[in-house]
Image (cartoon, rainbow, N blue to C red):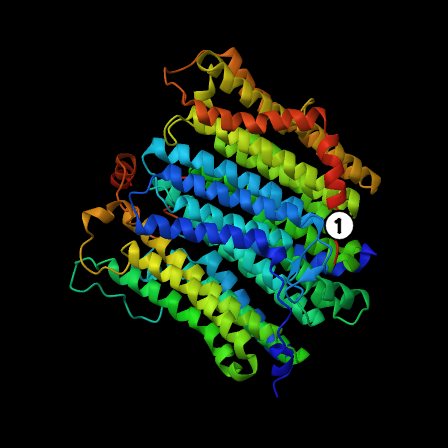
Amino acid sequence: MLAQFLIHPPIQLGPIGPELVLTGTAIVVLLGAAFNPRIGHSTLLLVSLLGLAGAALVSIGLWDWGGELTVLAGMVATDRFAVVARLILLGIAAMGLVYGYHYFRRSGEARAEFYPLVLFATAGMTLIAAAADLILVFLALEILSLSLYVLTGISARLSSVEGSMKYFLLGAFSSAFFLYGVAMAYGATGSTRLSAIAHALAGQTGSLGLALAAVAFLGIGFGFKVAAVPFHMWTPDVYQGAPTPVTAFMAAGTKVAAFAALIRVLETSFQPLTLDWTPLVWTIAAVTVVAGSLIAIAQTDIKRMLAYSSIAHAGFVLIALTAAGQDGISAALFYLLAYALMVLGAFGVVMLVSARGEGRTSLASYAGLYRRSRLLAGLLTLFLLSLAGIPPTAGFIAKVNVFRAAVAAGHWPLVLVGVLASVVAAFFYIRVMVLMYMQEPQDDAEPDRSPWPRVAVAVPAVLTLLFGVFPGIVLGVLDKAAILRW
Amino acid sequence: MLSEYLPIAVLATLAVLFGVASLGVSALLRPNRPTRAKLAPYECGIEPARLPAGERFPVKFYVVAMLFIIFDIETIFLFPWAVGFRQLGLFGLAEMAVFIALVFVAYVYVWKSGGLDWREPAPRRAAAAPPTALEPEAREVVRAG
Amino acid sequence: MIRLPLVLFFSAVLFSTGVYGVLARRNAVLVLMSIELMLNAVNVNLVAFSQFWHDITGQVFALFVIAVAAAEVGIGLAIVILIYRNRETINVDEVNLLKW
């Protein structure tokens, strides 16, 4: 029993290069700030961004990986899906760092730990996108979650600490369900490797009952992480309580990472059970888009409204997942990319409107924003149009792709639900626009006038428009990445 | 195919109905009297004592205890290595060195940011200490609540 | 020789006890303890399956779960202390600044 364990696998560190660069940078930043507390935060930001850029370069180098399909004893996948998911996540992290640098400097809560924590969380996110073994999926999930619990509570504001506690308690609760699912999958097939699980299930050497229980429990765990109804309760509280740059980072990052892992787990290890899990995903997707869109209408705080909108968007990605195979994965990847862009942009504008800290996040403070700052009002309009799925934005193309994939798979009732929910959702996005353009400002508070953060927020805006008008530039890449190799 | 799941669906529906019904009925009927005994952290009867009476425990104890638990548990990875030490050879030694180096990084961070100082924090460290200061807004909430 | 279903049943009971604790307890520390109970139920499962399949992966995974659980408790207690310093309570019902 011991002997099989002691034959050590060949060590190929190339495919986890991005994570090594990220953790290395994080350790350098962490110790650098600990040894020299007076170090300028612009230096920390610069080093962190360099680390992200290095990780991105290493990821791109993996695009044409010609070696084995999985390395390190079957733990890490080397396919293009992992490369694309990593690049999206690294971009999200870069935006989060830039936002955070500006936000915490203005609110006077600048803490050097912010940078390494974001880098550690990013390492967890990129690792989960490449994980080909349930053990690694769990470890990566914990790396990103534990970093995010701390990031949520990094501000001394009471609501931040409270959001952190709720996130932690529900997050740990969901991890336990996830783990139980992993144990069931292991019990059903005798392995935690995704490919070995698939082979055991396809060859019917495993226990079907345990495997179905595993799907259910893993579904609960992933449902919490991607914030699908009925596992969404933590989302609005945490998104509202966390400092806005952290919200932007985790809203975009966690969703992309958790969906990447969910896609890989469902489409590889539980592929033999596709007929069993599709109705499950179908139901959750329908409930999620409807509930997310309906509850968002009742919100009076823009961060809560965006939180419920992000729940609805999780439902749209789930709609893409009901169309198994390359079409579904490609549509889901494009949706995640578009979603990340618009969420980063929308929360960036929220951060700038709120000026300092979290003072002005109620919808009322958006009344007459057009008079205060045409640029911010224009940017927010663009992001809201994209969230609503109105052309010529990336959100529109993303929704069309998702619906097309689902119809091709024969799930047109689900698409009907999705379209109706989009119409409902358009209502509360347009309400914010009406507030911005048609109403008088209620107070004389000025939004943040710093130039650089505006440039940062303009980046996702440009990309949202670009991918909306010329989606072909990324769709080709995403199609190539949508084949899972295992 | 889906009809195979009918028994499970029926069972799940019954379970949810039972749960919701019993929670709902008890929420309507029960009086809400959170007595001290119900809120006590341990139900074995031992009360968590505050020593000496009324005085607050220095939070340092918690910090040190938590750090101890984390570093203590990390050593469980040493046990399987120690069992297979001879067979693993140089490879195992190198892997373990990497692991210990990483744990050491965490230790250096804790040390440098003052987590292990027992005395009152020096002014230099004020920025690195955990966020304890209440903002005016938060202070008001505490008073109001 | 203990039969596998018996162990699985025990683990399921342990897990359900943990779930009940998380849902019913109002003291944050108790909720944390209940989550630990759930994680340990998983460990029992993993070790049982490891024995059943004559495969060591499960036992290795159990070690990882223990280590991660310790890290989780460390962060959880830190957050609870932060809440207590701010609010003088760790009753999760009273921590309700954020409302839906």
Q: Quadrant of the C terminus of chain B?
A: top left
Residue located 26% across and 35% down the image? B136
Alpha-carbon neighbours of circle 1 within 10 Å: few (<14), some, or many (≥20)?
few
Question: Could you say whether the residue bearing mark 1 is in a helix, strand or loop?
Answer: helix
* Side of B14 where A278 appears, left or right: right
Residue located 27% across and 61% down the image? B116
Q: Is residue A101 depicted above or below A261 in this figure? A: above
Q: Quadrant of the N terminus of chain B?
A: bottom right
* Side of A433 where A69 appears, left or right: right
Please name whichever residue, A10 or A234, is drawn nearer the observer in this view of the structure.
A10
Q: Residue B86: percent from the left, percent from the top?
A: 53, 84
**Would residue C94 be seen by someone viewing this image from the given angle?**
yes
Q: Is residue C100 depicted above or below A300 in this figure? A: below
Q: Residue B141: percent from the left, percent from the top?
A: 29, 38
Q: Which residue is mark 1?
A: A279
Q: Residue A187: percent from the left, percent from the top?
A: 67, 71
Q: How many marks?
A: 1
**Would residue A230 be seen by someone viewing this image from the given angle?**
no
Q: Residue A376: percent from the left, percent from the top?
A: 50, 20
Q: Quadrant of residue B6?
A: bottom right
Residue located 52% across and 61% down the image? C19
Please name whichever residue, B121 or B96, is drawn nearer the observer in this view of the structure.
B96
Q: Quadrant of residue A362?
A: top left
Please give the chain letter of the residue carrying mark 1.
Answer: A
Q: Outermost residue toward the bottom? A: C1
Residue located 38% across and 47% down the image? A113
Please name whichever residue, C10 or B9, is drawn nearer the observer in this view of the structure.
C10
Q: Quadrant of residue A179?
A: bottom right
Q: Amino acid at mark 1?
A: Pro
